[in-house]
Amino acid sequence: MAVLEILKYGAGILREKAEPVSEVNDEIRVLVKDMLASMYAAEGVGLAAEQIGRKEAIFVIDVPVEEACGVAMPLVLINPVIRELEGEQCGQEGCLSFPGIYIQVKRAEKVVVDYMDLDGQPATVEATGLLSRALQHEIDHLNGVLLIDNMSAVQKVAHAGKLKRMKAGRL
């Protein structure tokens, strides 16, 4: 397992749409192990492949057991697709690609996501609360949508200095 560098805001790949994984093989399993190691080292709860410079439509999540909606953690999602969104919640979000920045983001309260698991089998996860928020956040990453895209004009101004340093590679 390798702990890989997590790319910060300004890295071009973060804006790219992920490419579907055609087959779950040993290379993908190693990538997932590296992603988990990198996420844990950075003390995050989720990490998308783009955040370590990879194009595969994969992300990993590990939320506290009391927030996991009965889902075994860590959760590995390959080629995830949101099937259903319901309700609304607003809560604080951060992102490993935006260290030190936390903003209020409006998300669906409940989400149903279809995906492929590490065995290459179709699976579905249904979640509310933090797990729902994490799933939606990581799927945003796979579509090139970043935390800054959820910021209000006021939030962008409040974080302007830090965002500018990040984008310039100085943070």
Image (cartoon, rainbow, N blue to C red):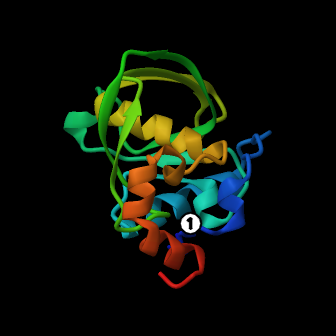
Q: Position of residue 97 (x, y in %)?
A: 50, 63
Residue identifier under label 1: 9
- Other residues around mark 1 within 10 Å, as few (<14) / some (14–19) / many (≥20): many
Residue 36 lies, in percent from the top left, at 47, 58
Relative to 105, 70 lies left or right: left
Residue appearing at x 55%, y 51% in the figure: 146
Note whether 131 is above or below 5 in the view shown: above
What secondary structure is found at the residue carrying circle 1? loop
At horizontal 41% and vertical 30% (from top left) the residue drawn is 107
Q: Position of residue 46 (x, y in %)?
A: 44, 50
Q: Quadrant of residue 143?
A: top right
93 and 123: which is toward the camera: 93
Q: Nearer the viewer, residue 42 or 121?
A: 42
Residue placed furthest toward the bottom: 170
Q: Which sits in the foreground, 22 or 87?
A: 87
Name the residue at the left extreme. Answer: 66
- Left or right relative to 157: residue 145: right
Residue 47 position, x and y percent, is: 50, 54
**Vertical side of 166 occupied by 88: above or below:** above
**Residue 30 at least partly seen:** no
Residue 72, quarter of picture: top left
**Residue 96 is at least partly visible in this image:** yes
How many discs mark residues in the rendered view? 1
| Picture residue at 44% right of the left edge, 74% below the top | 161
Q: Amino acid at mark 1?
A: Tyr
